[in-house]
Structures are given as C-alpha cells and as structure tokens.
Image (tube, helix red, strand yellow):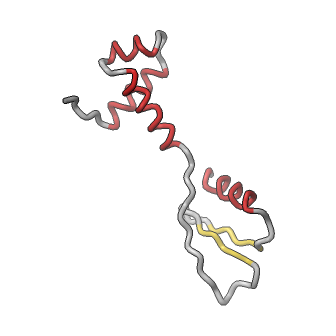
Amino acid sequence: MATKRTAEEIQRLLEGYRQRSGTRAEYCSQQGISVNMLAYYLQRQTKQARPRMARVRVASSSTSAAGTFALWLRNGRRIESAWNFRDTDLARLIRIAEAE
C-alpha cells in the first residue's frame, strides 16, 4: 500500500512538474509516481483554486428601505444596493469583490 503524501510533498511534486524539461511520463518515472496520480493532484489543485460562491443568509431589516439588500462577504466587506440589476450582474459583483 502506498504511503500518503503530505500537502508539502504534493506541492513540491507539482512545482517540479511545472518546471520540468522532459515529458510528463519521464517526470513521473523519475519521481516514482504514476501519471494518473500526477493528473489527480493537478486536477485537485485546479478545483481548489477555483473561486467558490459563499453561503448567504437572507434577513429582513427594519432599518433598510424597501427594495434594497445588503451582502456581507467572507472578508468582512459589506455591499448594499438597490436590487435593480440582473442575477448575472450580482454574481459578477460578488466574484470581483471576493477576488480582492
């Protein structure tokens, strides 16, 4: 049974792969891992790097005017606006705010 690699070992393998001069198969052979395992690590890293939507809680507030909303982001920022734009625009606003 293969030993489990630490996150640091996987990161070192991926960095070495990106800086290689030979083929993927040659690199994997030199490192003692299968091509499929390298592909798995690359795919997992790509999934982790993707921005993900945050869970939100909808609450009414007696202090806010009708037709407005407030969105609190994970980084503590707050977006408050009138809800007069498309869903795609809201998703874009959230992606931009979360990226900073």
The residue lying toward the viewer, choosing from 17 and 26, is 26
Q: Is residue 79 above or below residue 88?
A: below
Identified at 36% across, 31% down, the residue is: 10
Identified at 40% across, 11% down, the residue is: 26
Check the image and name the residue furthest to the left: 1
Identified at 19% across, 30% down, the residue is: 1
Left or right of 20? Residue 65 is right
Q: Is residue 88 above or below residue 71?
A: above
Classify residue 98 by image quadrant.
bottom right
Q: Position of residue 66 (x, y in %)?
A: 75, 84
Identified at 73% across, 62% down, the residue is: 87
Left or right of 93? Residue 84 is right
Check the image and name the residue furthest to the right: 84
The residue lying toward the viewer, choosing from 60 and 36, is 36
Left or right of 37? Residue 86 is right
Q: Position of residue 60 (x, y in %)?
A: 62, 84
Q: Position of residue 30 (x, y in %)?
A: 34, 13
The residue lying toward the viewer, choosing from 79 and 39, is 39
Q: Is residue 67 above or below residue 28?
A: below
Classify residue 6 by image quadrant.
top left
The residue lying toward the viewer, choosing from 52 and 97, is 52
Q: Position of residue 88 (x, y in %)?
A: 73, 57
Left or right of 11? Residue 71 is right
